[in-house]
Image (cartoon, rainbow, N blue to C red):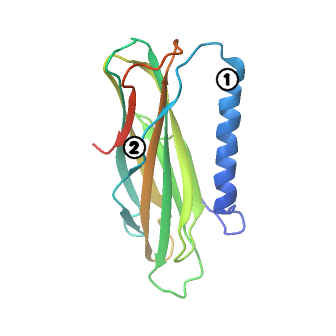
Amino acid sequence: MSLSREAAPSSRLRHWASRLLLLVACASVVATSKTPTSEDVNSDPYSGRPVTLTTKAPKTRIPVVMRVTASQSPDKPVEAVLQVRVSATWTPADPSEAVSPWLRAMLVTGDLDSGPQAGGVLVAGQPTEMDVQQYLDGHCTLGTSCDWTTNLDLELQPNAAAGEVTVEWTATGQAHVVDTTQTPNDFTVTVSEP
């Protein structure tokens, strides 16, 4: 994967583009769906432990758990979305280094090798932000809880100039119940690490 500084959109543009994409996707689902759903319930933001990647150790995997619970089960499917915001700061070993590496964030669920991803070119000393989200299937029927484990895979360009990137990340979840317009009692959404 090769990204140039000129080809990479600004982080503000990426932010609004991802929001527009989500809005269009949501609107298309609403426009074509006649299945009733409960109101969306959001989790509190979860800030995970920061990680450091280097050109010698350019990859890491962080498991993220999203859980939906209710005190009284409607025994209906749950649909959910996990969104992770990544903020990465590049520090080259040589401060005069002009070439910037790329960073990729990907959400991988189950036995898959790939999933939704976001990427960007890093600029020395300046945080680069990116958002990536994963739609979680409705194969979980809400008893007392539904759980999904999704891996946040982070990869720094491995053949870049020597240096390190500090990555901070925050995850949020959103869920609703399908085939009912009523939100179950004590319906809560949480995001954490195992």
Nearest the viewer among 40 and 111 is 40
Is 143 on the left or on the right of 164, as rendered? left
Quadrant where the image shows the C terminus: top left
- Provide residue 168's location: percent of width, then percent of height: 42, 61
Amino acid at dot 2: Asn
Residue 151, numbered circle: 2
Quadrant where the image shows the N terminus: bottom right
Is 127 on the left or on the right of 71, as rendered? right
Give the answer, above or below, for where 150 lies relative to 154: above
**Which residue has dot 1 on it?**
30
Q: Residue at x 44, y 52 (%)?
A: 170
Classed neighbour count for the residue bearing mark 1: other residues with Cα under 10 Å, few (<14), some (14–19), many (≥20): few
Toward the left, the furthest residue is 194
Amino acid at dot 1: Val
Give the answer, above or below, for where 60 lies relative to 77: below
Nearest the viewer among 30 and 92 is 30
Nearest the viewer among 42 and 12 is 42
Classed neighbour count for the residue bearing mark 2: other residues with Cα under 10 Å, few (<14), some (14–19), many (≥20): some
- Provide residue 29's location: percent of width, then percent of height: 66, 24
